[in-house]
Amino acid sequence: QVQLVQSGGGLVQAGGSLRLSCAASGRPVSMYAMGWFRQGPGKEREFVAGISRGADRTSYADSVKGRFTISSDNARNLVFLQMNSLKPEDTAVYYCAADRSGLLTTNKVDYGYWGQGTQVTVSS
């Protein structure tokens, strides 16, 4: 099975940028569809972005389209979430996740493997 370890995140002013990284071990990230989710204070965990196995398709939540970009580096077994034009409402704990089916899905129950989470705080 795959293990996911996240890095990046932190505190940034509104309008700024951050990049989150997710390092996979145990299995190649290319075997999975990968997703990024977030959970704000008092909120449900929600889908942010996903990339299919083979990286031929991506999907984004409407709230981040045009601002966030998901990508993968199969040679280094990494998945990234580049976040630009950040807003205070983007403040949340962000999680990367892997779906063994390889299908691009927005449903968190389809993802069986999760990173530890990383805090992103956007100040106004």
Image (cartoon, rainbow, N blue to C red):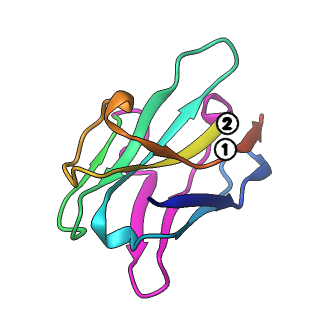
Q: Please identify the residue farthest to the top as the structure is shown.
A: 42
Label 1: how many Cα within 10 Å (few below 14, some 14–19, many 20+): many
Name the disc covering residue 9, or none: none
Q: Where does the C terminus fall, quadrant-wise?
A: top right
Q: Categorize mark 2 by other alpha carbons within 10 Å: few (<14), some (14-19), many (20+).
A: some
- Indicate whether residue 17 is drawn in magenta: no
Residue at x-position 77% and y-position 47%:
13
Viewer-proximal residue among 5 and 41: 5
* Residue holding disc 2: 93
Q: Which residues are magenta?
A: 62-91
Give the mark toward the camera: 2 or 1. 1
Q: Secondary structure at mark 1?
A: loop
Which element is circle 2 on? strand
Q: Which mark is residue 117?
A: 1
Image position of 106 (left or right of 45): left
Question: What's the amino acid at mark 2?
Answer: Val
**Circles 2 and 1 in contact, beta carbons < 8 Å:** yes
Q: Residue at x 39, y 31 (%)?
A: 108
Residue displayed at 31% across by 71% down: 30
Q: Is residue 57 visible?
A: yes
In the rendered image of this protein, does residue 106 appear above or below residue 30? above
Q: Amino acid at mark 1?
A: Gly
